[in-house]
Amino acid sequence: MYVPFLTRRRGGGRSGGSSSSGGKGSSSSSGKGTSSSSSSGKSSGSSSSSTGKTINSGGASRSSSTTSFGGGKVSTISSGIFSGRSIGGGNRGQVYGTRTYGSGYPGVAGRGVAGRGFPFYFWPLAFGGGLGYTSHAAYMHSDEYGRPDNSSRPGGAMSTATFQSNFSSPVTTLRLTADNDTITTLIPILAANCSARLTLASALTTAQPMNYSAVETLVQPESVVQYYRASSVALTLDGYNNSAVFADENTTAANTDTLLPGYVDAVLLGCLNTTIAQNVPLVDGALAFGAAAGGWAWLLVLATAIRLSGLF
């Protein structure tokens, strides 16, 4: 039986889409849920009110929200550097990836993100320079989606937030990495839901810019314990070195992820994992129109409803 985060997983996140079925998010390719392991003294469920921001993706402004289910029709980007790629369609039941860069893409298998579409509108993470890495790992340090400090990234330049356990020794230090809007949106939700396991400093954590350098020691692909939302969000563990991620790009061969250290606070890890998946901002499928088109559509619906009601 596979226990999320605690049992060695076969397959190493080989499929980018296999973990997205049925809304039963998981850190494994088995698709089994993880929400039952998230107890922290507080509920790790969805936030009580919608929190989100407007992002620019695919040439249009789109509203993202912590309560959005996502989904909607898949369309094609008509212009710009990603012209011809697909965009949209991903829903909250598909946000879980695995520990492999390129996981979490609904219906897409294989490592890496080169040439892929944007099922959740957000761009996959960029890990900065790859000096010193072998050719096997170079694809995880590509600049196809710009540098981590690229402000044109949907949601803004990449940022990180640090969460430390007050229940483990050595201290369990987990870092959330994503675009700045996603980080600033999730911080208060994570701090509230998982506060029983967090140090005071972690409960008051703020977003920090992701440094761009040839060697970024704190956030690297091999330290990721979970990807979300088509590899646009990652949760990393300080000191974790997962050698399984260094397989060749586009391969789907089964690899075995390195076990997590025994001292890891599994309760905090489970709480953060579930809370992120349930609250990570998504673009509502109903809002996948351009701002003007969507506005006129709703005005037409409202006018029709008023006319049918006999008010004028």
Image (cartoon, rainbow, N blue to C red):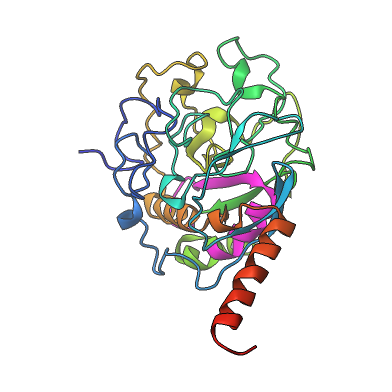
For the point 39% across and 52% down, the residue is 270
**Residue 111 point in image, percent of width and height:** 49, 22
For the point 32% across and 31% down, the residue is 9
Q: Quadrant of the C terminus?
A: bottom right
Q: Is residue 180 magenta?
A: yes
Q: Quadrant of the N terminus?
A: top left
Work out whether 298 lies above or below 32.
below
Q: Compare residues 273 and 253 and report the one nearer the observer.
A: 253
Q: Which residues fall within the magenta stretch? A: 165-189
How many numbered badges does the structure rendering display?
Answer: 0
Side (left or right) of 172 relative to 13: right
Residue 206 visible in the shown view: no
**Residue 112 point in image, percent of width and height:** 54, 23
The quadrant holding residue 119 is top right
Q: Compare residues 215 and 102 and report the one nearer the observer.
A: 102
**Residue 102 point in image, percent of width and height:** 52, 29
Residue reaching furthest top?
Answer: 135
